Image: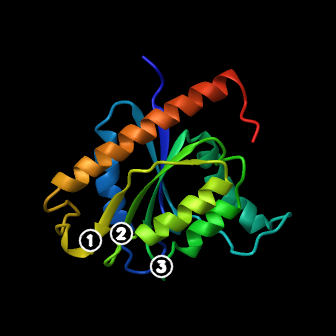
């Protein structure tokens, strides 16, 4: 039996009263049902990276990077759980992306988004462009929650999980295919991008 695919699930929102952890908990529950995935949740509220990039980061920034960079490097694939803020994604996520380079390369990324009428899809479309510049493969299939606040019960469970569970399965199938294919190829030859 092959080694599980290491998937880092990134909770992008750091706002007070955020809903991201509820959605991430549901999604990781679905993902953990597969024996072929090893899930690592990276909550950006625990990794306060500055927006100002520096070639020589401060000691405080190096300490934050030491807590998150190795986890990104070890991941074979990513899922970003993101809200839509002002028709795009949170600054906390952009900081995480910009502080790293090689950690992203030749890996797939999927998206679970949430928000109002667009369900976070405008954030996802912006992220596709950004992650393409990081030499990543973005999985076409997504999970989107339009107005999610009424879709979960007080314990964080989906009231009607049928459609969302189906979408999560489709996303995970594609992520696992790409993650395995890229991992196997990199074992044969390093990515040269």
Which residue corresponds to the image point at 37% horizontal and 46% vertical from the top-left? 171
Query: Residue 4: x and y, percent?
Result: 45, 29
- Height in image: 130 above or below 141? below
Residue under numbered circle 3: 87
Q: Position of residue 116 (x, y in %)?
A: 32, 78
Residue 148: image tag: 1
Quarter of the image with the N terminus in it: top left
Q: Check whether the beta carbons of the residues at disc 1 and disc 2 lie within 8 A of each other.
A: yes
Label 1 – label 2 distance at C-alpha: 7 Å
Q: Earlier in the sequence, mark 3 or mark 1?
A: 3
Q: Is residue 87 above or below residue 129?
A: below
- Callout 1: helix, strand or loop? helix
Q: What is the quadrant of the C terminus in the image?
A: top right
Mark 3 near mark 1, Cβ–Cβ under 8 Å? no
User: Of all residues shown, which one is farthest toward the top?
Assistant: 1
Which residue is under mark 2? 114
Label 2 to label 3, Cα distance in Å? 12 Å
Q: Residues within 10 Å of mark 1 (few under 14, many from 20)?
A: some
Residue 93: give x, y in percent of width and height: 57, 67
> Quick one: label 2, few (<14), some, or many (20+) residues within 10 Å?
many
Is the residue marked by circle 3 packed among few (<14), some (14-19), or many (20+) residues within 10 Å? some
Give how far across and how far down residue 188 sits, in percent. Answer: 67, 21
């Amino acid at each position: 039996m092959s080694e599980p695919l290491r998937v880092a699930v990134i909770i992008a929102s750091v706002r007070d009263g955020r809903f991201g952890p509820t959605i991430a908990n549901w999604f990781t529950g679905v993902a953990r049902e597969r024996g072929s995935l090893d899930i690592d949740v990276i909550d950006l509220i625990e990794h306060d990276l500055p927006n100002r990039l520096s070639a020589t980061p401060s000691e405080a920034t190096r300490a934050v990077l030491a807590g998150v960079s190795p986890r990104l490097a070890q991941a074979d694939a990513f899922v970003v759980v993101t809200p839509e803020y002002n028709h795009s994604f949170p600054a906390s996520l952009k900081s995480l992306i910009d502080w790293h380079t090689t950690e992203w390369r030749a890996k797939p990324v999927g998206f679970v988004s949430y928000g109002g009428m667009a369900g976070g899809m405008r954030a996802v479309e912006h992220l596709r462009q950004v992650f393409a510049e990081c030499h990543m493969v973005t999985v076409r299939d997504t999970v989107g929650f339009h107005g999610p606040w009424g879709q979960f019960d007080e314990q964080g469970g989906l009231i009607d999980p049928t459609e969302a569970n189906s979408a999560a399965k489709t996303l995970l199938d594609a992520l696992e295919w790409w993650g395995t294919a890229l991992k196997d190829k990199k074992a044969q030859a390093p990515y040269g991008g």
